[in-house]
Image: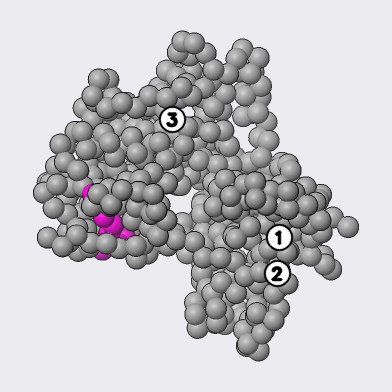
C-alpha cells in the first residue's frame, strides 16, 4: 500500500518510479537535470525517483507515496508547494500572456520592490538561472576593474569560469583554469595567498552551513575596498531566507554585487543580479547581458507576490523559529543517546546532518538515515530546507521519526552492521563540500 505520513511497517512501493527510470535509461544522461535530485543522491531501490505533485510541505510520488519534504525542490519552494497566493498570481498573468514582443511593466514593478528590500540594490537585472546571474556578475567585475582573476568560495554553477576548479572540468580550455582560484571559508590567509594584482572579484556564498568567524565577511569587505576588487555575494540560498534582504541585511554588509534565485519566486525560474549603479550600468553598452526570457511575465509575477508575502508574513522570522525547533530537537536526541559522530550544522533556515568517520562510513550512515526516514514518510537528502508551509506538526512528527532512526543507527554502528542494514545502494559522493572546497591557491 502507498505510504501516508505515519510510521510504516515497510518501505515505499516504487514500482512506477522504477518503470519510468528504466524508460529514461540511455535517453537522459545520468537520468537527471539537477544533480541533487538524481538517483545517486537517494538510496536506489528504496527511495522514490519521480515525484508527481506537492501541496504545502508534502509531496506525492508517482506511486502514490506521500512524504514530508525537506528538500523543497533543492531550494526554490520557500513558501511551499501550490502556495495559493503565488499560484493565483501566475494564473492571472497567464490569462494575459507569458512572453511579449516589448517589455512588460512587471519588470519595473518587481525591480522597485527588490530595491526596497535588498541592500545596495541600486540596479536590477533578470535572468533565468543562477548560472547566468553569477557569470554576469563575474563579467561585470572584470569589465569594471579591467582585471581577470576570480577568487571563489562555495558553489556557483556550471559555467566554465567556475566549474573549471572542480573535478568536472572536461571540455573547458586550459587557459580558462588559469583565471579562477578558490579559498577556504573563514580563512583570510587563504584569500591573501590567492590574491594578485590581476584579481577582479571575490565571489562567495556568504554562509553555507558554517558561521563566519572573526568578522570574516567584514574583513573581506575591507580587503576588496582596499584592493579595488569587486565583492560578490552569491545569495542563491541566503537571499530572502536568512533575512528579507539576504545576508547583506543579516550581517550589515554591502557587497558590490549580489545575485539571487531559488527562494525568490517559490519555484518559478528567475535569477536576479543587483548592485552598484556604477558597475551595473556597464550592461548598457559594454557588457552584454541580455536574454529572451529575462522578462518572462509568469516568473516576474510569482517573484513579486513571493517577496510581498514574505514581507507581510515575516517569513524569514518563521523559518528561523521553525528551523530552530527542528535543529534543537535533533541535537537533544543526539545528546540524550550520546551519539557524538552525528552533528547538525547551519543556520536555522537550512541545516545539515553530518556524519563523522568515528561512527563508520559517513555515506553508509547517511544512506541508512535516509532509508529509515523514507520508511517513515520523510523525504530527506541530508539537509533541511525550511519553508513557510512546514508546520509545528511536521516538526513534531519529524522529531519522533529522528528519535527512532538515530537510535537504530546507533545500534547498527555499535554492532558494526550499518552496511548490512541497507536495503538499497549507498549514496554517491558529489564534488561539493562545505569546507576545503578544491582549494587551488595561486603561488605569487
- SS assignment at label 2: loop
User: Position of 440 compared to 72: left or right?
Assistant: left
* Quadrant in the picture for the N terminus: bottom right
Q: Using the numbered discs, state the Cα–Cα distance from disc 3 to disc 1 in whole angstroms.
A: 33 Å
Q: Residue at x 55, y 42 (%)?
A: 76
How many residues crowd around disc 2 within 10 Å: few (fewer than 14), some, or many (20 or more)? some
State whether the magenta stretch is mostly helix, strand or loop: loop
In terms of depth relative to the viewer, which is nearer, 416 or 124? 416
Q: Residue 215, located in which quarter of the rendered image?
A: bottom left
Q: Residue at x 40, y 22 (%)?
A: 112
Q: Position of residue 308 (x, y in %)?
A: 52, 29
Which residue in the structure is indicated by mark 1?
47
Q: Residue 370, located in which quarter of the rendered image?
A: bottom right
Vertical arrangement, residue 9 with respect to residue 81, above or below: below
Does residue 34 show up magenta in the picture? no
Does residue 186 show up magenta in the picture? yes
Q: Position of residue 153 (x, y in %)?
A: 33, 55
Q: Using the numbered discs, state the Cα–Cα distance from disc 3 to disc 2 in whole angstroms.
A: 39 Å
Q: Which residues are magenta?
A: 179-187
Query: Pointer 3 and pointer 2: residues touching (CB < 8 Å)?
Result: no
Query: Pointer 1 and pointer 2: residues touching (CB < 8 Å)?
Result: yes
In terms of depth relative to the viewer, which is nearer, 361 or 4? 361
Which residue in the structure is indicated by mark 2?
424
In this view, which residue lies farthest toward the bottom? 415
Q: Earlier in the sequence, mark 1 or mark 2?
A: 1
- SS assignment at label 1: loop
Which residue in the structure is indicated by mark 3?
127
Q: Position of residue 299 (x, y in %)?
A: 54, 27
How many residues crowd around disc 3 within 10 Å: few (fewer than 14), some, or many (20 or more)? many
Q: Residue at x 29, y 43 (%)?
A: 232
User: Position of 210 compared to 74: left or right?
Assistant: left
Amino acid at each position: 500500500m502507498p505510504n501516508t505520513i505515519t510510521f510504516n511497517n515497510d518501505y515505499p512501493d516504487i514500482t512506477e518510479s522504477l518503470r519510468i527510470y528504466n524508460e529514461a535509461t540511455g535517453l537522459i544522461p545520468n537520468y537527471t537535470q539537477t544533480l541533487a535530485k538524481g538517483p545517486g543522491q537517494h538510496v536506489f531501490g528504496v527511495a522514490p525517483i519521480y515525484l508527481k505533485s506537492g501541496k504545502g510541505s508534502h509531496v506525492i510520488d508517482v506511486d502514490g507515496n506521500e512524504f514530508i519534504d525537506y528538500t523543497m525542490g533543492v531550494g526554490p519552494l520557500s513558501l511551499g508547494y501550490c502556495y495559493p497566493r503565488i499560484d493565483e498570481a501566475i494564473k492571472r498573468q497567464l490569462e494575459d500572456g507569458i512572453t511579449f514582443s516589448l517589455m512588460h511593466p512587471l519588470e519595473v514593478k518587481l525591480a522597485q520592490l527588490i530595491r526596497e528590500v535588498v541592500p545596495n540594490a541600486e540596479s536590477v537585472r533578470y535572468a533565468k538561472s543562477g548560472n547566468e546571474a553569477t557569470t554576469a556578475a563575474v563579467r561585470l567585475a572584470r569589465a569594471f576593474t579591467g582585471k581577470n582573476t576570480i577568487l571563489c568560495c562555495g558553489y556557483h554553477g556550471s559555467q566554465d569560469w567556475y566549474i573549471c576548479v572542480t573535478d568536472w572540468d572536461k571540455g573547458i580550455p586550459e587557459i580558462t583554469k588559469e583565471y579562477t582560484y578558490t579559498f577556504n571559508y573563514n580563512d583570510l590567509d587563504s584569500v591573501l595567498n590567492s590574491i594578485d594584482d590581476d584579481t577582479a572579484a571575490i565571489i562567495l556564498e556568504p554562509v553555507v552551513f558554517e558561521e563566519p568567524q572573526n568578522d570574516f565577511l567584514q574583513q573581506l569587505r575591507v580587503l576588496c575596498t582596499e584592493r579595488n576588487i569587486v565583492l560578490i555575494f552569491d545569495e542563491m540560498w541566503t537571499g530572502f531566507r536568512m533575512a528579507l534582504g539576504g545576508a547583506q541585511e543579516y550581517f550589515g554588509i554591502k557587497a558590490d554585487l549580489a545575485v539571487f534565485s531559488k527562494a525568490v519566486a517559490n519555484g518559478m525560474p528567475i535569477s536576479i543580479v543587483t548592485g552598484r549603479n556604477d558597475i551595473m550600468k556597464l550592461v548598457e553598452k559594454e557588457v552584454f547581458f541580455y536574454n529572451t526570457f529575462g522578462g518572462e511575465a509568469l516568473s516576474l509575477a510569482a517573484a513579486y507576490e513571493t517577496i510581498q508575502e514574505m514581507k507581510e508574513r515575516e517569513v524569514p522570522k518563521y523559518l528561523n523559529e521553525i528551523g530552530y525547533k527542528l535543529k534543537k530537537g535533533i541535537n537533544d536526541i543526539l545528546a540524550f543517546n550520546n551519539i557524538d559522530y552525528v552533528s547538525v550544522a547551519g543556520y536555522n533556515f537550512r541545516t545539515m546532518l553530518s556524519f563523522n568517520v568515528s561512527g563508520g562510513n559517513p555515506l553508509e550512515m547517511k544512506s541508512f538515515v535516509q532509508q529509515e526516514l523514507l520508511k517513515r514518510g520523510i523525504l530527506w537528502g541530508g539537509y533541511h530546507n525550511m519553508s513557510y508551509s512546514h508546520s509545528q506538526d511536521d516538526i513534531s512528527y519529524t522529531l519522533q521519526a529522528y528519535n527512532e532512526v538515530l537510535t537504530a543507527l546507533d545500534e547498527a554502528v555499535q554492532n558494526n552492521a550499518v552496511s548490512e542494514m541497507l536495503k538499497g545502494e549507498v549514496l554517491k559522493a558529489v564534488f561539493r563540500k562545505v569546507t576545503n572546497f578544491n582549494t587551488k591557491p595561486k603561488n605569487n
